[in-house]
Image: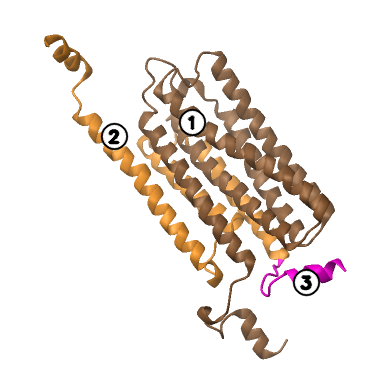
């Protein structure tokens, strides 16, 4: 009875193979644990050239986001995922514009501002 | 399975445009994915604000003074583990297994609640030493970014309770299984945002 109802409601192609998916969660967990521990280690180590650490942390974070997308959110190049990939690409584009655009503009404004003591001096003169 | 059916199943024979409407699950997933991306864009704006303001401490405590790396590692572990148990839970939903759905989703809920308790205790500690959101621009940006993530986790936990009640009353009709699928996407996306939070806010503080 219950299986009949389920069979009616499911569209063709909706069947999912659960066994391979379980393995993909475990593989993803393995990668994610390694990358997380690596970034915690990298942030407090003396082994790495210090100015390179922020770049390393960025690379590790982006790699881990990729792992999560592929192994947990199951974003793939399958034909029924084309729209998801396109939306993701646009999302990454907007996120990049927002974050780096804001940082560049604010750094530029900061750079062009008078130092605080001279600003105070100007105000006193008036 | 005949050769024709096999070709259909593998998706080579029929071009995408001639295959008819996509399964509801794919369409619902796409719609929810668009929502998640717009949510991530909100977080991007908050990340940008934090990146700009993280040095503006107005003479108050700096990021390096406030954040404890061990605490964050435990929080990260909770959220990562809950992401995996949520994945196992959605597999149990797909196979219509009530007991293991309750089991995995209960673990997911406990891990998520543990994460939230740790975050609230951290916020409480910061407020008690006078490092509240009104202390400096840096702390305003911090509380907005991390608080918004915490709010999402809270909403996720409420959603999970509602979904478990739906399983208890309705069982596993396609509608419920689709909603669980969307919940899984939401939960995994929160974990992706957390990667950005712990890298930029907490690990970035000690550089």
Q: Which mark is residue B144?
A: 1
Most extreme residue toward the left is A125
First reached walking from the N terminus: tag 3 or tag 2: 3
Question: In the structure shown, which secondary structural element does the residue marked by tag 1 occupy?
Answer: helix
Q: Is residue A25 above or below residue A104?
A: below
Whether the residues at callouts 1 and 3 have beta carbons within 8 Å, the answer is no
The mark tally for this picture is 3
Q: Is residue B200 left or right of residue B10?
A: left
- Disc 3, SS: helix
At a point 52% along the width and 78% down the height, the residue shown is B16
Q: Which chain is brown?
A: B
Estimate the x, y position of residue A71 in percent, counting from the top left.
60, 57
Residue A76, image x, y percentages: 54, 64
Question: Is B109 in front, or is B196?
Answer: B109
User: Is residue A9 shown in magenta?
Assistant: yes
Q: Is residue B144 magenta?
A: no
* B93 left or right, relative to B117: right
In the image, residue B6 sits, relative to residue B63, either above or below, namely: below
Magenta stretch in the rendered image: A1-17
Asked whether residue B77 is in view, the answer is no
Tell me, by letter, which chain the rendering colours orange: A
User: In the rendered image, which quarter contains the N terminus of chain B?
Assistant: bottom right
Q: Quick one: quadrant of the C terminus of chain B?
A: top left
Point out residue B171 in the picture as x, y percentages from the top left corner: 81, 56
Tell me how far mark 3 sits from mark 2, CA to CA. 57 Å
Residue identifier under label 2: A106
For label 3, the residue is A7
* Residues marked 3 and 2 touching at CB (< 8 Å): no
Q: Splitting the image into 4 quarters, where does residue B30 fall?
A: bottom right
């Amino acid at each position: 009875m219950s299986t009949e109802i389920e069979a009616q409601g499911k569209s063709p192609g909706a069947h999912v193979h659960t066994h391979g998916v379980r393995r993909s969660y475990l593989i993803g967990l393995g990668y994610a644990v390694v990358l997380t521990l690596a970034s915690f280690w990298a942030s407090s180590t003396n082994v790495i050239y210090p100015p390179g650490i922020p770049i390393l942390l960025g690379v590790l974070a982006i790699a881990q986001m990729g792992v999560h997308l592929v192994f947990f959110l199951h974003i793939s190049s399958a034909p029924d995922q084309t729209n998801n990939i396109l939306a993701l690409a646009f999302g990454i584009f907007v996120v990049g514009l927002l974050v780096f655009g804001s940082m560049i503009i604010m750094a530029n404004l900061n750079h062009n501002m008078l130092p605080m003591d001279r600003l105070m001096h100007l105000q006193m003169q008036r | 399975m005949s050769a024709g059916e096999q070709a259909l199943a593998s998706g080579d024979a029929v071009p995408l445009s001639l295959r008819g409407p996509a399964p509801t699950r794919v369409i619902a997933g796409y719609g929810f994915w668009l929502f998640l991306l717009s949510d991530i864009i909100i977080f991007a704006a908050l990340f940008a604000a934090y990146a700009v303001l993280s040095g503006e401490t107005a003479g108050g405590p700096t990021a390096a003074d406030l954040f404890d790396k061990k605490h964050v590692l435990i929080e990260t572990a909770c959220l990562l583990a809950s992401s995996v148990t949520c994945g196992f839970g959605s597999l149990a939903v797909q196979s219509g297994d009530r007991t293991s759905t309750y089991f995995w989703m209960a673990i997911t809920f406990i891990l998520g609640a543990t994460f939230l308790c740790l975050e609230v205790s951290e916020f409480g500690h910061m407020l008690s030493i006078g490092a509240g959101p009104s202390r400096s621009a840096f702390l305003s940006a911090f509380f907005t970014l991390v608080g918004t993530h915490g709010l999402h986790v809270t909403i996720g936990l409420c959603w999970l309770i509602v979904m478990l009640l739906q399983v208890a009353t309705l069982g596993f009709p396609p509608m419920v299984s689709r909603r669980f699928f969307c919940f899984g996407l939401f939960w995994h996306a929160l974990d992706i945002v957390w990667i950005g939070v712990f890298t930029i806010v907490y690990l970035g503080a000690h550089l």
